[in-house]
């Protein structure tokens, strides 16, 4: 999408009243409308999840940085090195993730506290969280740091 193209995709979401109100408040605090806030946050979320947005994409947060600025230059460089860094760390990230999970699973299997076990069941079943977020929550609850 070029900067001259209009926004032509529509996304319909079913969200709770609580989330709707929180989005409304956050947008007001930023001085922007709700749709702009959601587009901005979604752009940041997909970048955080490892996706790439072109510099022409209106939801790319780097678009607001003037060309030639330090922020713009560093953002471009980071975008360039991320694939290489992911490739270098991929095998180790896998090993680290599996080790964390196995350590957590061992703590769960030896736990005698029904409240902690119930919490573990709730977190493992919570698909609004990424797998690593679930592990982090449970590591905190089980005192694994």
Image (cartoon, rainbow, N blue to C red):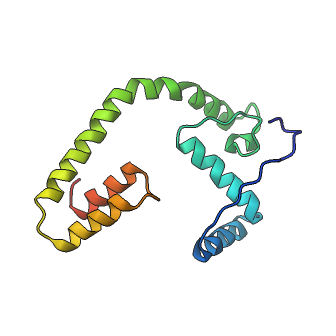
Residue pictured at 59% horizontal, 30% vertical: 79
Residue pictured at 70% horizontal, 60% vertical: 12
Residue pictured at 28% horizontal, 59% vertical: 138
Task: Tell which of 85 and 90 is nearer to you.
Answer: 90
Estimate the x, y position of residue 95 in percent, counting from the top left: 27, 34
Estimate the x, y position of residue 117 in percent, counting from the top left: 21, 67
Q: Quadrant of residue 102?
A: top left
Residue pictured at 87% horizontal, 45% vertical: 6
Mark count: 0
Judge from the rendering whether residue 70 lies leftward or rightward of residue 95; answer left or right.
right
- On screen, residue 140 above or below 71: below
Estimate the x, y position of residue 94 in percent, counting from the top left: 32, 34
Q: Quadrant of residue 54?
A: top right
- On screen, residue 131 above or below 116: above
Judge from the rendering whether residue 56 lies leftward or rightward of residue 73; answer left or right.
right
Quarter of the picture holding the N terminus: top right
């Amino acid at each position: 999408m070029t900067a001259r193209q209009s926004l032509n995709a529509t996304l319909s979401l079913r969200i709770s009243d609580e989330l709707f109100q929180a989005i409304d408040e956050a947008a007001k605090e930023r001085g922007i409308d709700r749709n702009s806030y959601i587009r901005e946050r979604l752009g940041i979320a997909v970048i955080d999840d490892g996706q790439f947005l072109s510099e022409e994409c209106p939801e790319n947060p780097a678009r607001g940085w003037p060309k030639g600025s330090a922020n713009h230059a560093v953002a471009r460089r980071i975008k360039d090195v991320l694939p290489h860094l992911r490739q270098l760390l991929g095998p180790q990230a896998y090993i680290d993730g599996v080790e964390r999970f196995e350590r957590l699973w061992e703590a769960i299997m030896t736990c005698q506290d029904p409240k902690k076990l119930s919490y573990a069941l709730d977190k493992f079943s919570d698909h609004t969280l990424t797998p690593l977020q679930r592990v982090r929550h449970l590591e905190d609850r089980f005192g694994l740091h």
